[in-house]
Image: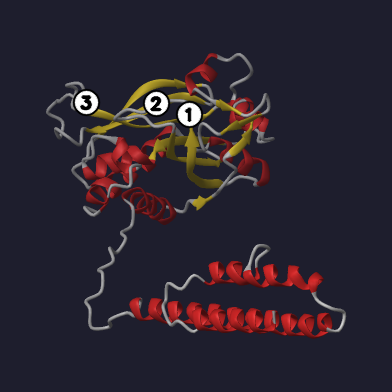
Amino acid sequence: MKKKLEQIKENAFKELQDKRKDLDIESIRIKYLGKKGELTHILRGMKELSKEERPIIGKLANDIRTALENAIEEASQRIKSSERESRVKGETIDITMPGIKQNIGRRHPLEQVLEDMKEIFVSMGFTIEEGPEVELDYYNFEALNIPKNHPARGEQDTFYINDNLVLRTQTSPTQIRTMEKQKPPIKMISPGKVYRSDSVDATHSPIFYQMEGLVVDKGITFADLKGTLELFARKMFGDKMKTKFRPHHFPFTEPSAEMDATCFVCNGEGCRVCKGEGWIELLGCGMVHPQVLRNCNIDPEIYSGFAFGMGVDRMVMLKYGIDDIRNMYESDMRFLNQF
């Protein structure tokens, strides 16, 4: 039995000393030390030994088992180290190889135009105010003279979170919050993202950007409104841009109007975009409704004001002659690289 144990040790060590990278260490361990392994099979025959031989053979068997376990662990580490070295050599970076050129990002046309719009209004003395995109129904509708069941609510195509919370459909709620916090004179704009349940097409998107403006002071008239917006249009699109005002209706302004600008596609000659009229709607505006002022604890007998709201996306389309709003949200580098 002693000779058999020595032979098992010799055979196992010969196999483990093999330098092959694909040497299966686990199969060697099972072959010699597993439940049905050669060493285990020999030890099962110890019951046939005399009492004097058992301690000697038992110690020898344990020594061989320990030696084999250590040899197996060393062989395993040797193979892992060899594989790691080969992998590192294979992954070595050749610094003489030309690098991969990275595309440099550009400012998105929406962001460019938004910054231009801010700069124009700031130069006219407006401050920039911000408000939450998840808004209370009161600020989004009721304080703006749009009570429950008002027909204008249906026109907004609102995303309701619950009865009292909505995704804001306009940035006008920021005007209400500003009037609640500040006393006149007030001169502010509120740019930001808004949400409406619109189907996606060339001119509509469920998420888009707006900029609303508000001026409240003593003696503010519709002439101030027209002068401000016409100056904005000339600074934004150049002196050749023509504008006109049409009567309209908004619950939160009275009187109300829409301002049109020369069509950016046909330059006023008439096309499919402007439906042959030569004009395209630019923004909505009007004098702040007295009830809206009262809702903010501002006395309409003393103060008056005007408000306006415009789509930033539409401004981008006008400025750069883009006829499909979807181009601005699809992250196509072929489109964005033009700006």
Q: Which residue is mark 3?
A: 274
The answer to whether any part of residue 73 appears in the image is: no
Residue 323 vertical placement versus 276 (above, below)? below
Q: Residue at x 37, y 52 (%)?
A: 111
Position in image of residue 213 (x %, y %): 48, 41
Secondary structure under the numbered disc 1 in the rendered image:
loop
Question: How far separated are the C-alphas under marks 1 and 3?
Answer: 23 Å
Q: Quadrant of the C terminus?
A: bottom left
Position in image of residue 3 (x %, y %): 65, 83
How many residues crowd mark 1 within 10 Å: few (<14), some (14–19), many (20+)? some
How many numbered marks does the figure carry? 3
Q: Earlier in the sequence, mark 1 or mark 3?
A: 1
Q: Earlier in the sequence, mark 3 or mark 2?
A: 2
Q: Nearer the viewer, mark 3 or mark 2?
A: 3
Q: Nearer the viewer, residue 175 or 336?
A: 336
Q: Which residue is mark 2?
A: 257
Q: Nearer the viewer, residue 77 or 188?
A: 77
Position in image of residue 266 (x %, y %): 14, 32
Answer whether labels 1 and 3 touch (C-beta < 8 Å): no
Answer whether labels 1 and 2 touch (C-beta < 8 Å): no
Q: Earlier in the sequence, mark 1 or mark 2?
A: 1
Q: Quadrant of the N terminus?
A: bottom right
Q: How is the image coloured?
A: secondary structure
Q: Which residue is mark 1?
A: 196
Which amino acid lies under the numbered mark 3 shown in the image of this protein?
A: Cys
Q: Residue at x 68, y 27 (%)?
A: 164
